[in-house]
Image (spheres, rainbow, N blue to C red):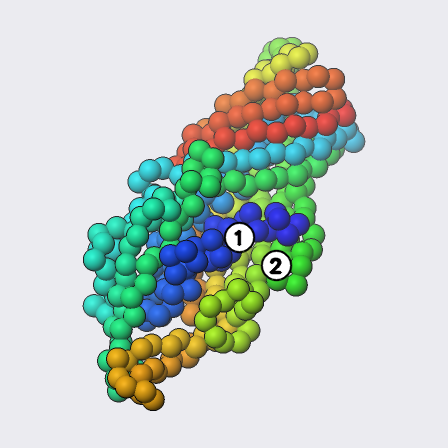
Amino acid sequence: MKKFALTILMLTCVVTMKAQQNDGLESILYANIQDANKLTQAYLNPGMKGLIYGMNSGWYHTAKAHKTFGFDISIGLNASMVPSKDELFRFADLGLSPSTTSTSLTGATVAGTNTLEAPVTITAVIEGQTVSKTFNMPAGVKEDLPLNAVPTPSVQFTLGLPKQFDVMVRLVPEVGSDDVKGNLFGIGLKKEITSLFGVIEKLPLHISLLGAYTNMDVNYNIQNDSSIQGANQVATFNLNSYTVQAIASINFPIINFYGGIGYGAGTSNLKMLGTYVLEYETGQPFPNDKVEKTITDPINLDFEASGVRATVGTRLSLGFFKIFADYTIQEYNTVAAGIAFSFR
């Protein structure tokens, strides 16, 4: 579970560990609270949107409903591809205050390259003294993400119910370590409606309606990894996503083809809680060479993504063993692939 949680958090608070080579996200806290939130949101936004789109994918690989109490267990990986336009952000578009400036026009988002350096200079008046702090924005992790795609793994159990209903469940109970704890719950419902179309019932064509919802919570104790003194330093991440789709499949004994069209949306929230003691150099002789400022609960960000989606895919059936893959066209196009063990 810890590895799963770290995979998810890589695009939120855990990215601070990876980004330490360029001072890291924590250095953004030296800006005033409003600017720190704007910079953090600009950096993380593509990762958060990718998570939402990924969590809404991989819910089905056929429109045909199980027989009553038939079931399948599927293991899959979704990858939401970040468009090139979201690999960078423009400082001028963020509405930063005059106290936060950069000599660079653009900075890398979490989905950008790890070679772009974007220096930021902070000026402030603390305890009556004018101070400044310069740091580099954290680098992206594009080179570490195949296809520059945000990964979202899934393990799903599907159970057939009477009246051609299927219920799907994704569940990861709260487990982890002292530093990272997370849980995930997803539920979906599929209703086959092929019988409503009369003669179609005699064809290998199946039509269904599907709705699904996912909630994920992760808490990360960043105190031990923090380069900034303080207390009770914790990052929390919450995600809620949902999708509604009309799906169809043509089922043959060995291979089937499936697709769907619908809508997906979601929101997520990231908070950095605790106290952080920021130390600034004044340029004055000792003992007046440094001043400190303490901030509390500095980051509270909301992210969202939504849009129409269309999916096309195929599944290979080898008895009860299935292999499936599909491609979804949406704002962040998504590839899903996996295996399933199905018992009708």
* Residue matched to label 1: 9
Q: Amino acid at mark 2?
A: Val
Q: Which residue is rendered at x = 58% and y = 56% of the image? A: 217
Which x, y percent locates residue 86? 34, 43
**Residue 271 or 302: which is nearer the viewer?**
271
Q: Looking at the image, is 48 positioned above or below residue 75?
A: below
Which x, y percent locates residue 145? 47, 39
* Residue matched to label 2: 180
Q: Is residue 244 visible?
A: no
Q: Looking at the image, is 330 positioned above or below residue 95?
A: above
1 or 2: tag closer to the N-terminus: 1
Task: Kindly indicate whether the residue at mark 2 contacts the one at mark 1 (C-beta within 8 angstroms).
Answer: yes
**Residue 276 or 159: which is nearer the viewer?**
276
| Image-based side of 272 in relation to 170, left or right | left
| Image-based side of 239 in relation to 47, left or right | right
User: In the figure, residue 125 lies in which quadrant?
Assistant: bottom left
Q: Amino acid at mark 1?
A: Leu
Q: Which residue is rendered at x = 50% and y = 67% of the image? A: 226
Distance (Cα) linking label 1 and label 2: 9 Å
Q: Which residue is rendered at x = 33% and y = 38% of the image? A: 84
Q: Is residue 50 visible?
A: yes
Which quadrant would the C terminus be assigned to in this image?
top right
**Residue 96 or 18: which is nearer the viewer?**
18
